[in-house]
Amino acid sequence: MRLNKIILSFVSALVILFSTSVASFAKVVGDKIILGAAISLTGKYSSNGVHTQNGYNMAVDRINSMGGVKVGGKTYKFDIIYYDDESNPKRAAQLAERLISQDGVEFMLGPYSSGLTKAIAPVTEKYGVPMVEANGASRSLFTKGYKYLFAVLAPANLYLDVAIETAVELNGGKPVRIAQAFEQDAFSQDVRLGILDAAERTGSKIIIDDKLPKELNDMAATLVKVKQMKPDVLVVSGHTKGALTAIRQIAEMKVDVPMLAMTHCDAAKLSKQHGKNSQYALCASQWHKSLTYKDDFFKDGMTYAADFEKEFGYDPPYQSAESSAALLVFKDAFERANSFDQKKVRDALAATNMQTFYGNIKFAPGGQNVDKPMVLFQVMCDASGSCENKVVAPLKWASAKLIHPIPKWSER
Amino acid sequence: MDFLVFQYPMITLQACLDGILLGVLFALIAYGMALQWGVMNIINIAQGDLVILGGYIAYFMYLYGIHPAWGVIVAPIIMYFVGIAIYKLVINKVVDRDLFISILATFGISILFMQLMNFAFGADVVLANSGYGTTMLFDNNVVLPNSKIFSAFISIVFAVCLVIYMKKSKLGRAIRATAQNARAAKILGVDTEKVYAATFGINAALCGVAGALISITFTIHPYMGLPYTIRSFMIVIVAGLGNLPGVAMSGMGLGVFEEFADYILGTEFRIGSVFLLLVLILVYRRFKLSRKREYLK
């Protein structure tokens, strides 16, 4: 009898708990639109996870303080429920499931990294929950026919192909010899595919094609081959670890190569950690504060950077800027849909065609943003040793002229 | 497959030298593992995480304007006490249990350390710049970063000091006696509890030295410890316990093997080839052992 009572009270406690949690976190409560996000606040992606969260929070505050979102003649404010996915794809998928089925969230923001976005996308797709993501660039995300996934950033295969085209152009239109080293993860391998396409387009030849392990801390073997075979361009992509290892060993081994193109330079704080050794490295970036795109909320890149620094105490990396842009896209879509119906919001997202401080946004049927080119910046240092990233391509936004070929180590 | 390494003798030489310099550093970490494995019968899965923690000590010195090379003095001192603390809190409770319990316990410590380092130092990949420059040999065809030469040199100095210490000092003799037969040592008046604590402390100190060296030659990150654990485990398996020249030789051998695997099979198979070698050696050892058994029959 007593046992029955205990079971009964336990079950009723669970029912009460569950019902209150659903009621308090429904999609739109009062004047609040509640978005859900699983973000890496701990684990190996936590630095970039925090950049993502700061970007989201900055945009939420800005949009709310500037009048919020107007739907059906009423004004709503954004609010976000965050969970920590511990940088773990399985956990991210579980949390997406929880956000949707327990917390009742009907609109999602993306996590950090392609891997985690890949884990979450099938869940949001299953429930028909529109997700605007800002940090998953892998091409494979956009070839699966997802209908509810929208990415404000350019896909990974476009990261460095500009570098190859620039190298060919500087070589008088003649093909170049390329050495490349890529980590074996979804993102870097997509960057590699982009290089293969660019090489085929320009008739260039790939003479070294190394794959770097995830536990990478030594790429001396690749660099010895580069020294021996003297390519025209060296391309490296292996997240922050790859960028830091490459610059350290290129400087130590005095590897001379006319062009060095990489990813993740600003996330790795290359110029701060390596100083003058990182000079002349060409880096792919989704965004740079000097770009002249404009919107009503953040004005332009420079203003965004200044406001961000005031609030969070550091210069915004592109991961924060693109995360802020995701909120602007959602606001625009809600207002155009004039409804909270998921299908209508999804259709409005698909029809997005706008400019934000981060760049133009227009989605292809696969969900990727096709209206925003990548930019390349080059690390440039002055005589005192202080270094700065300056945009060198595309020419429209270039604030400095590309230095090519990179001076030899013996002449520096 | 790429046989470039054999086409140019200079690349072969470069691979050998890179491998040896790397191997000496691995051997230092492995020696600490062999020591505590031999004395306490504990396989320390957290070995690599202790290395990374040592690396962070050197990195923070670098951040505060002290040359990171001083880390090879400061890191082992701090790490010695970290080691003693870990022993007092966890290891002394599992030291007499079977190997499986100790593996689980140190695995737990490893996860805890990773998360704590991530929490305290952030998830950014960092490094300390020594500014040591480069040595060029054979008309600039063979390139050796001085930081790698420095690492190998310091590793050798510490290894030699440790050997002398183990042979000459009272504690060293007590450690060796405990490794041979803990019960007999206890009966003869050796305080094995203290010996165990000191052994774990010395192992952590060696990891501290190695970590400081890694921060100036490679990069450090809270989640990068495991490959170092695996490599030292591998070296100890090949060399056997309590065999310092064996550990040094097997460390260098593994370093060279890794470099050649990198050139021939590609960088992606570097760690995989270490595992493959481990399996082959274990199979070979079993095969040898079973033949011996037959002979005895």
Image (spheres, rainbow, N blue to C red):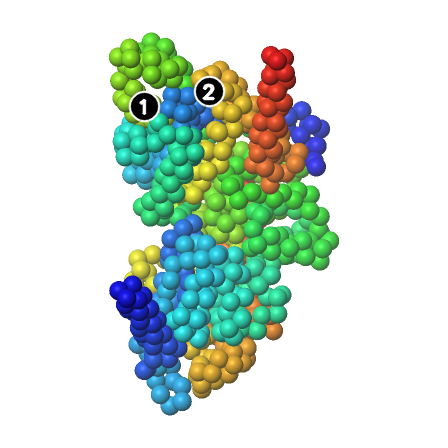
* Callout count: 2
Instruction: Give the x, y percent position of residue B13.
Output: 61, 24
The residue lying furthest to the front in this view is: A1
From the image, tell me which residue sits under label 2.
B241
Instruction: Give the x, y percent position of residue B241.
Output: 46, 20
Question: Residue placed at 37% from the left, 77% from the top?
Answer: A26
| Residue A259 appears in the rendering | no
Q: Is residue B71 above or below residue A23?
A: above
Position of A371 with respect to A299 (left or right) is: right
Question: Residue placed at 67% from the left, 30% from the top?
Answer: B5
The reply to whether the C-beta atoms of the residues labelled 1 and 2 are less than 8 Å apart is no
For label 1, the crowd category at 10 Å Cα-Cα, with few meaning under 14, some 14 to 19 and many 20 or more, is many
Position of A176 with respect to A237 (left or right) is: right
Asked which quadrant contains residue B192, the reply is: top left
Among the two numbered marks 1 and 2 on one chain, the one whose residue lies closer to the N terminus: 1
From the image, tell me which residue sits under label 1.
B196
Instruction: Give the x, y percent position of residue A351.
Output: 54, 80
For label 2, the crowd category at 10 Å Cα-Cα, with few meaning under 14, some 14 to 19 and many 20 or more, is many
Amino acid type of the residue that numbered disc 2 sits on in the rendered structure? Leu
| Residue B291 appears in the rendering | yes
Amino acid type of the residue that numbered disc 1 sits on in the rendered structure? Tyr
Q: Is residue A140 above or below residue B279?
A: below
Residue placed most toward the observer, A107 or A126: A126
Q: Secondary structure beneath disc 1?
A: helix
